[in-house]
Image: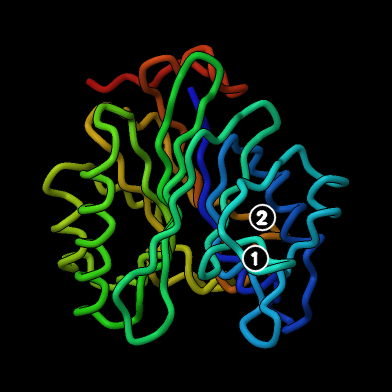
Amino acid sequence: MLRVASYNIRKSVGTDWRRRPLEILAVLNEIDADVVALQEVDRRFGTRTSSLPQQAIRDTTRYVPVALDTRPGGLGWHGNAVLVREGIEAERADCLTLPALEPRGAAVVDLVIGKARLRVVAMHLGLLGLWRRRQTAAILSHVARMEPGLPTVMMGDLNEWNPEGRCFGLFGRDHQVVMPGRSFPSRMPLGALDRFILSPDVDLVETKVHVSNRSRNASDHLPVYADVAFSGSEAAGRHIRPLVSRA
Protein backbone atom coordinates (compact mmCIF):
# COMPACT_ATOMS: atom_id res chain seq x y z
CA MET A 1 0.00 0.00 0.00
CA LEU A 2 1.17 3.49 -0.82
CA ARG A 3 0.23 6.91 0.54
CA VAL A 4 -0.13 9.80 -1.90
CA ALA A 5 -0.85 13.38 -0.91
CA SER A 6 -1.76 16.67 -2.55
CA TYR A 7 -1.19 20.10 -1.03
CA ASN A 8 -1.70 23.62 -2.36
CA ILE A 9 0.90 25.47 -0.30
CA ARG A 10 0.17 29.01 -1.57
CA LYS A 11 3.86 29.78 -2.04
CA SER A 12 4.45 28.78 1.61
CA VAL A 13 2.40 31.75 2.84
CA GLY A 14 0.35 30.94 5.92
CA THR A 15 -2.96 32.30 7.09
CA ASP A 16 -1.05 35.04 8.92
CA TRP A 17 0.38 36.12 5.52
CA ARG A 18 3.92 35.26 6.58
CA ARG A 19 6.06 33.00 4.41
CA ARG A 20 7.04 29.99 6.51
CA PRO A 21 8.36 27.14 4.36
CA LEU A 22 9.47 25.13 7.38
CA GLU A 23 5.85 24.94 8.50
CA ILE A 24 4.89 23.44 5.14
CA LEU A 25 7.64 20.86 5.44
CA ALA A 26 6.56 20.04 8.99
CA VAL A 27 3.01 19.42 7.73
CA LEU A 28 4.39 17.07 5.08
CA ASN A 29 6.22 15.16 7.80
CA GLU A 30 2.93 14.86 9.70
CA ILE A 31 1.24 13.29 6.67
CA ASP A 32 4.16 10.91 6.04
CA ALA A 33 3.20 10.20 2.42
CA ASP A 34 5.32 8.37 -0.14
CA VAL A 35 4.48 10.68 -3.05
CA VAL A 36 3.37 14.31 -2.76
CA ALA A 37 1.97 16.66 -5.40
CA LEU A 38 2.38 20.33 -4.51
CA GLN A 39 0.64 23.29 -6.08
CA GLU A 40 1.75 26.94 -5.99
CA VAL A 41 5.23 25.91 -4.92
CA ASP A 42 7.08 28.72 -6.73
CA ARG A 43 6.86 32.44 -6.13
CA ARG A 44 4.61 34.13 -8.63
CA PHE A 45 6.65 37.18 -9.57
CA GLY A 46 10.27 38.04 -10.33
CA THR A 47 12.55 35.06 -10.86
CA ARG A 48 9.78 32.72 -9.64
CA THR A 49 12.13 30.79 -7.39
CA SER A 50 10.83 28.02 -5.17
CA SER A 51 9.19 29.02 -1.91
CA LEU A 52 10.55 25.75 -0.48
CA PRO A 53 14.36 25.85 -0.30
CA GLN A 54 15.75 22.56 -1.58
CA GLN A 55 18.32 22.53 1.20
CA ALA A 56 15.50 22.71 3.75
CA ILE A 57 13.74 19.81 2.03
CA ARG A 58 16.93 17.75 2.30
CA ASP A 59 17.61 18.77 5.90
CA THR A 60 14.14 18.36 7.39
CA THR A 61 12.37 15.66 5.35
CA ARG A 62 13.04 12.37 3.59
CA TYR A 63 11.76 13.72 0.29
CA VAL A 64 13.50 14.24 -3.02
CA PRO A 65 12.02 16.63 -5.62
CA VAL A 66 11.42 15.11 -9.04
CA ALA A 67 13.47 17.03 -11.61
CA LEU A 68 11.14 19.04 -13.84
CA ASP A 69 11.80 21.60 -16.57
CA THR A 70 11.94 24.54 -14.18
CA ARG A 71 13.54 27.94 -14.10
CA PRO A 72 16.84 28.29 -12.20
CA GLY A 73 15.99 28.12 -8.51
CA GLY A 74 12.47 26.87 -9.21
CA LEU A 75 10.96 23.60 -8.09
CA GLY A 76 7.72 23.34 -10.02
CA TRP A 77 6.24 23.49 -13.49
CA HIS A 78 3.68 26.30 -13.47
CA GLY A 79 3.79 25.85 -9.70
CA ASN A 80 3.31 22.05 -9.73
CA ALA A 81 5.99 19.97 -8.05
CA VAL A 82 6.30 16.30 -7.12
CA LEU A 83 8.20 15.08 -4.08
CA VAL A 84 8.99 11.40 -3.58
CA ARG A 85 10.26 9.45 -0.63
CA GLU A 86 13.94 8.56 -0.78
CA GLY A 87 14.38 5.36 -2.78
CA ILE A 88 11.58 6.10 -5.25
CA GLU A 89 12.88 6.87 -8.74
CA ALA A 90 11.36 8.90 -11.56
CA GLU A 91 11.94 7.26 -14.93
CA ARG A 92 10.02 9.85 -16.93
CA ALA A 93 8.74 13.37 -16.28
CA ASP A 94 6.59 15.29 -18.77
CA CYS A 95 5.73 18.96 -18.29
CA LEU A 96 2.42 19.97 -19.86
CA THR A 97 1.35 23.50 -20.72
CA LEU A 98 -2.42 23.52 -20.42
CA PRO A 99 -4.85 25.68 -22.40
CA ALA A 100 -5.71 28.69 -20.26
CA LEU A 101 -6.16 32.43 -20.04
CA GLU A 102 -3.57 32.37 -17.24
CA PRO A 103 -0.45 30.20 -17.04
CA ARG A 104 -1.44 26.66 -16.05
CA GLY A 105 0.39 23.37 -16.27
CA ALA A 106 0.60 19.80 -15.10
CA ALA A 107 3.45 17.38 -14.42
CA VAL A 108 3.17 13.73 -15.47
CA VAL A 109 5.72 11.50 -13.76
CA ASP A 110 6.30 7.76 -14.12
CA LEU A 111 7.74 6.35 -10.90
CA VAL A 112 9.55 3.14 -10.03
CA ILE A 113 8.72 2.09 -6.48
CA GLY A 114 10.52 -1.10 -5.64
CA LYS A 115 9.17 -3.63 -8.13
CA ALA A 116 6.08 -1.53 -8.82
CA ARG A 117 5.48 1.29 -11.28
CA LEU A 118 3.05 4.16 -10.85
CA ARG A 119 2.10 7.12 -13.00
CA VAL A 120 1.39 10.35 -11.12
CA VAL A 121 -0.19 13.49 -12.55
CA ALA A 122 0.19 16.67 -10.48
CA MET A 123 -2.17 19.41 -11.60
CA HIS A 124 -3.72 22.75 -10.71
CA LEU A 125 -6.74 23.57 -12.84
CA GLY A 126 -8.04 27.04 -13.68
CA LEU A 127 -10.69 29.21 -12.09
CA LEU A 128 -13.12 29.15 -15.02
CA GLY A 129 -15.23 26.12 -15.86
CA LEU A 130 -14.69 26.26 -19.63
CA TRP A 131 -10.92 26.22 -19.18
CA ARG A 132 -11.05 23.51 -16.53
CA ARG A 133 -12.82 21.26 -19.02
CA ARG A 134 -10.25 22.02 -21.70
CA GLN A 135 -7.41 21.42 -19.26
CA THR A 136 -8.94 18.12 -18.14
CA ALA A 137 -9.26 17.01 -21.76
CA ALA A 138 -5.63 17.97 -22.45
CA ILE A 139 -4.36 15.97 -19.48
CA LEU A 140 -6.40 12.90 -20.37
CA SER A 141 -5.30 13.13 -24.00
CA HIS A 142 -1.63 13.26 -23.03
CA VAL A 143 -1.93 10.31 -20.64
CA ALA A 144 -3.76 8.30 -23.32
CA ARG A 145 -0.78 8.70 -25.65
CA MET A 146 1.71 7.42 -23.07
CA GLU A 147 2.74 3.85 -22.36
CA PRO A 148 -0.46 1.98 -21.49
CA GLY A 149 -1.08 -0.20 -18.48
CA LEU A 150 0.46 1.85 -15.68
CA PRO A 151 -1.62 2.35 -12.53
CA THR A 152 -2.31 6.08 -12.44
CA VAL A 153 -3.04 8.61 -9.70
CA MET A 154 -3.96 12.14 -10.76
CA MET A 155 -4.16 14.68 -7.96
CA GLY A 156 -4.23 18.36 -7.25
CA ASP A 157 -6.31 21.47 -6.77
CA LEU A 158 -9.13 21.18 -9.29
CA ASN A 159 -10.69 24.54 -8.34
CA GLU A 160 -14.15 23.02 -8.81
CA TRP A 161 -16.78 23.99 -6.24
CA ASN A 162 -19.70 22.27 -7.97
CA PRO A 163 -20.00 18.57 -7.02
CA GLU A 164 -21.46 18.01 -10.49
CA GLY A 165 -18.71 19.98 -12.23
CA ARG A 166 -18.13 18.88 -15.81
CA CYS A 167 -14.42 18.24 -15.30
CA PHE A 168 -15.47 15.51 -12.85
CA GLY A 169 -17.60 14.01 -15.59
CA LEU A 170 -14.63 13.94 -17.97
CA PHE A 171 -12.33 12.39 -15.40
CA GLY A 172 -15.03 9.98 -14.27
CA ARG A 173 -15.57 8.36 -17.67
CA ASP A 174 -12.65 5.99 -17.17
CA HIS A 175 -11.42 6.83 -13.67
CA GLN A 176 -12.64 7.07 -10.10
CA VAL A 177 -12.98 10.62 -8.78
CA VAL A 178 -12.13 10.68 -5.06
CA MET A 179 -13.23 13.47 -2.72
CA PRO A 180 -11.33 13.37 0.59
CA GLY A 181 -13.48 16.17 2.03
CA ARG A 182 -13.59 19.92 2.38
CA SER A 183 -10.12 21.42 2.24
CA PHE A 184 -10.53 25.15 1.50
CA PRO A 185 -10.19 27.57 3.18
CA SER A 186 -8.04 25.89 5.78
CA ARG A 187 -9.45 27.57 8.88
CA MET A 188 -13.09 26.99 7.96
CA PRO A 189 -13.24 24.53 5.06
CA LEU A 190 -16.18 24.98 2.70
CA GLY A 191 -14.98 23.64 -0.64
CA ALA A 192 -13.71 20.18 -1.62
CA LEU A 193 -11.29 21.59 -4.18
CA ASP A 194 -8.46 19.08 -3.73
CA ARG A 195 -9.09 15.62 -5.17
CA PHE A 196 -7.65 12.37 -6.43
CA ILE A 197 -8.43 10.67 -9.74
CA LEU A 198 -7.63 6.94 -9.80
CA SER A 199 -7.35 4.58 -12.74
CA PRO A 200 -9.45 1.38 -12.47
CA ASP A 201 -6.41 -0.69 -11.45
CA VAL A 202 -5.80 1.47 -8.36
CA ASP A 203 -7.87 0.59 -5.28
CA LEU A 204 -8.71 3.26 -2.73
CA VAL A 205 -8.10 2.06 0.81
CA GLU A 206 -8.64 5.31 2.71
CA THR A 207 -8.68 9.04 2.02
CA LYS A 208 -8.75 12.01 4.38
CA VAL A 209 -8.19 15.71 4.75
CA HIS A 210 -5.20 16.19 7.04
CA VAL A 211 -6.28 18.52 9.84
CA SER A 212 -3.88 19.64 12.55
CA ASN A 213 -3.11 22.88 14.34
CA ARG A 214 -0.16 23.33 12.01
CA SER A 215 -2.00 22.52 8.78
CA ARG A 216 -4.80 24.96 9.60
CA ASN A 217 -2.28 27.79 9.57
CA ALA A 218 0.50 26.79 7.15
CA SER A 219 -1.51 27.53 3.96
CA ASP A 220 -5.00 28.53 2.86
CA HIS A 221 -5.63 24.92 1.77
CA LEU A 222 -5.58 21.82 3.93
CA PRO A 223 -3.59 18.92 2.50
CA VAL A 224 -5.35 15.73 1.46
CA TYR A 225 -4.04 12.19 1.28
CA ALA A 226 -5.09 8.78 0.03
CA ASP A 227 -3.84 5.30 0.81
CA VAL A 228 -3.98 3.26 -2.38
CA ALA A 229 -3.19 -0.29 -3.47
CA PHE A 230 -2.17 -1.50 -6.91
CA SER A 231 -0.13 -4.28 -8.47
CA GLY A 232 3.20 -4.50 -6.65
CA SER A 233 2.30 -1.88 -4.06
CA GLU A 234 2.11 -4.42 -1.25
CA ALA A 235 5.90 -4.34 -1.16
CA ALA A 236 6.42 -0.77 -2.35
CA GLY A 237 5.43 1.59 0.42
CA ARG A 238 6.17 2.05 4.08
CA HIS A 239 2.50 2.21 4.97
CA ILE A 240 1.67 -1.43 5.53
CA ARG A 241 -1.86 -1.48 6.94
CA PRO A 242 -4.66 -4.04 6.71
CA LEU A 243 -6.89 -3.38 3.72
CA VAL A 244 -10.36 -2.04 4.45
CA SER A 245 -13.14 -4.40 3.41
CA ARG A 246 -14.83 -3.32 0.19
CA ALA A 247 -18.02 -5.22 1.01
Q: Amino acid at mark 2?
A: Ser
**Dot 2 corresponds to which residue?**
212
Instruction: Answer with the quarter of the image where residue 45 lies.
Output: bottom right
Q: Quadrant of the C terminus?
A: top left
Which numbered tag is attached to residue 216?
A: 1
Give the left or right position of residue 177, taking residue 83 as reference: left
User: x, y (%) of residue 186?
Assistant: 56, 69
Q: Residue at x 15, y 42 (%)?
A: 174
Q: Is residue 146 visible?
A: yes
Q: Amino acid at mark 1?
A: Arg
180 over 127 or under it: above or below: above
Give the left or right position of residue 75, taking residue 58 as reference: left
Which is nearer the eye, 147 or 190? 147
Q: Is residue 223 visible?
A: no
Q: Residue at x 21, y 44 (%)?
A: 144
User: x, y (%) of residue 49?
Assistant: 71, 73
Instruction: Answer with the quarter of the image where residue 149 lies.
Output: top left
For label 1, the crowd category at 10 Å Cα-Cα, with few meaning under 14, some 14 to 19 and many 20 or more, is many
Mark 2 secondary-structure assignment = loop
